[in-house]
């Protein structure tokens, strides 16, 4: 695992149910781990990807989700279809370890999307959840009562300028991860 790149992924979706709702935005940061003997790795950004994805069944979307993630038909005018979006992600993430804030939520949507489109992901099977990492690292810190991305950003002094957009949230997750490595 120490030699693998990390792929930080955040998704925006049309709702919370992976059986009914769809991915509409993918934010991704690919990073390398650089060893620091005795201090753990330094994480260096290689590339960022931001993709708006055309929903196929907008009618099944949750209006509250649209309010939160800012979906409008105008903002998604130049969105790409799901399959080419996944193909672009797959091309960049072979053997990388997925990192996310509540990684299981994003993984379940990705897994459904891979199955639906027939795109084969090549990511490493291990995943890192920043919530679990934060819980372990900040357990004795009385200020750490919640482990949402917003709460962790506030606690760690990270600015997330466009909360609930995939690229902004994945940038914040990347910064949270880096700070947690040094706790």
Image (spheres, rainbow, N blue to C red):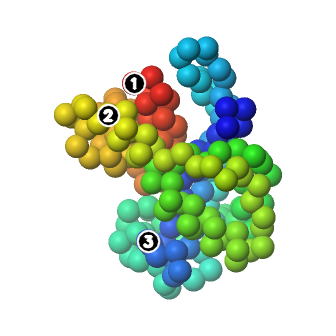
CB within 8 Å, label 2 to label 1? yes
Give the Cα separation between the discs numbered 3 and 2.
Answer: 28 Å
Task: Compare marks 1 and 3 and give the one earlier in the sequence.
Answer: 3
For the N terminus, the quadrant is top right
Q: Nearer the viewer, mark 3 or mark 2?
A: 2
Name the one closer to the observer, 117 or 129.
129
Mark 1: which secondary structure?
A: loop
Give the Cα separation between the discs numbered 1 and 3.
Answer: 32 Å
Mark 3: which secondary structure?
A: loop
Q: Which residue is mark 2?
A: 138
Is 68 placed left or right of 107 in the picture? left
- Identified at 56% across, 14% down, the residue is 38
For the C terminus, the quadrant is top left
- Identified at 57% across, 83% down, the residue is 57
Instruction: Give x and y (percent) for residue 7.
Output: 64, 44
Q: Which residue is mark 3?
A: 16
Dot 1 crowding, Cα within 10 Å, few <14, some 14–19, many 20+: few
Identity of the residue furthest to the bottom in this view: 59
Give the Cα separation between the discs numbered 2 and 1.
Answer: 8 Å
Q: Which residue is mark 1?
A: 183
- Identified at 32% across, 34% down, the residue is 138
- Identified at 71% across, 61% down, the residue is 85
Residue 22: name its quadrant: bottom right
């Amino acid at each position: 695992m120490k030699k693998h790149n990390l792929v930080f992924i955040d998704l925006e979706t049309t709702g919370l149910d992976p059986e009914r709702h769809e991915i509409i935005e993918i934010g991704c940061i690919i990073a390398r781990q650089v060893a620091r003997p005795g201090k753990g790795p330094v994480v260096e950004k290689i590339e960022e990807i931001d993709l708006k994805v055309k929903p196929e069944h907008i009618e099944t979307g949750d209006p509250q989700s649209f309010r939160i993630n800012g979906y409008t038909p105008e903002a998604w005018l130049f969105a790409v279809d799901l399959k080419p979006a996944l193909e672009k992600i797959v091309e960049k993430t072979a053997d990388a370890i997925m990192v996310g804030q509540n990684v299981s939520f994003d993984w379940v949507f990705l897994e459904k999307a891979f199955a639906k489109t027939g795109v084969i992901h090549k990511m490493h099977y291990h995943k890192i959840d920043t919530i679990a990492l934060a819980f372990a690292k900040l357990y004795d810190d009385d200020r750490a009562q919640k482990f949402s991305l917003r709460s962790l950003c506030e606690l760690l002094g990270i600015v997330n300028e466009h909360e609930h957009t995939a690229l902004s949230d994945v940038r914040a997750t990347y910064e949270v991860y880096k700070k947690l490595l040094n706790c």
